[in-house]
Image: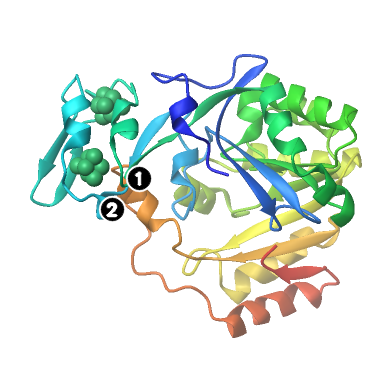
Amino acid sequence: MLLDSRESAGSGEKGSAGNKGLVFNIQRYSIHDGPGIRSTVFFKGCPLRCKWCSNPESLNNFAELMVRETRCNGCGRCIKVCAPGALSLAASGLRLDRVKCDLCLKCIEACWEDVLELAGRQMTVDEVIEECSKDELFYRNSGGGVTLSGGEPLLQADFALQLLSSLKELGFNTALDTCGHVPWETLEKALAYTDLVLFDVKHIDSEEHRDGTGTDNKLILSNLEKVMAANMARIWIRVPVIPGYNDSDRYMQELSGRLQGMKAEKVSLLGYHEWGRAKYQSLGRAYQLNGRTPLTEERLSGIIGIFKAKGLNATAGY
Ligand code: SF4
Ligand code: SF4
């Protein structure tokens, strides 16, 4: 479900403050973020900047407008209600000056074509639980539950921990999708209320990791080992497979060798795609991975074979 921005409190919303957190989507009937049918709560804010990220609206820890220019019919209704003069029509379409915009959201109400959308809304723990509870029957019948994803949920640590503990108290199955670049103390606290950790491993070489994500991998790899040693939750490792970055046989041999001794239940190999490309444009940002071709099924099967040869339970996709 995409949150109704017209209900939002509006301007300048920043990340977590205890019982409230900044969420940009609650996706119901998700089957890609853990077992069974789930609701995935997408947190805003991430410490990494992966070049292939398909959720660019998750990166910043503040609310922002998305503009789907191709839907705009040029009627100008939004421009008339925009007091700061942040909107204008150019030959190429609607233009948004993000410096002038104060997120009053009047343009969203004025537009009949669903061009403008707010990414990010402050929600309380109770509001998130109320939304997730609508599908409780589906969770129970399918072995599903609620997954915290993002962005990085643990960047809004207080909110994420309160949400996880409340969900557990209510008997929900919980999953945490983490990039691992968070303080161990926070991750350890979260494990107490988490049934399944979806732990992302982008690259095991430090320089390559920095090149692809903007950040060193030292903390991530250290946390991965600690999560394994803690033995408090099921663990699925997720590996985005990016052409020309981490898809060589040689690297996959190295990675699978590194994961071989660990207690992960599953290694999910997520093939590169460009589904998020249009969102970059709607946020006024450039897509960074031009000229990459998604992997063929045969290629992904070959990579899975490398992991299976080492006794790992590897799958394509989730
Ligand atoms: S939210 Fe819309 S109407 Fe309000 S300042 Fe920004 S662009 Fe203008
Ligand atoms: S109101 Fe909607 S359709 Fe009309 S100019 Fe603004 S964005 Fe385009």
Q: Which residue carries the number 1 mark?
A: 114
Q: Is residue 193 above or below residue 200?
A: above
> In x, y percent, where is residue 220?
66, 41
Count of marks overlaid on the render = 2
> In x, y percent, where is residue 39?
70, 45
- Image-based side of 208 in relation to 171, left or right: left
Quadrant of the frame with the C terminus? bottom right
- Image-based side of 169 in relation to 304, left or right: right
Decide which of 162, 315 is in the foreground and name it. Answer: 162
Residue found 82% across the figure and 63% down from its top: 260
Render colour scheme: rainbow
Quadrant of the frame with the N terminus? top right
Residue 217: which disc?
none
Visible residue check, residue 300: yes
Mark 2 vs ligand 2: CB under 8 Å?
yes
Residue 71: which disc?
2
Q: Quadrant of residue 111?
A: top left
Q: Is residue 163 above or below residue 298?
A: above
The extreme left residue here reads: 91
> In x, y percent, where is residue 2?
53, 42
Secondary structure state at the residue bearing disc 1: loop
Residues under numbered marks 1 and 2 in contact, where contact means CB atoms less than 8 Å apart: yes
Q: Earlier in the sequence, mark 1 or mark 2?
A: 2
The extreme bottom residue here reads: 298
Visible residue check, residue 288: no
> In x, y percent, where is residue 56?
44, 45
Give the residue type at disc 1: Asp
In space, the residues marked 1 and 2 are separated at their CA atoms by 7 Å
Mark 1 vs ligand 2: CB under 8 Å?
yes
- Ligand 1 sits in quadrant: top left
Secondary structure state at the residue bearing disc 2: helix
Residue found 81% across the figure and 61% down from its top: 266
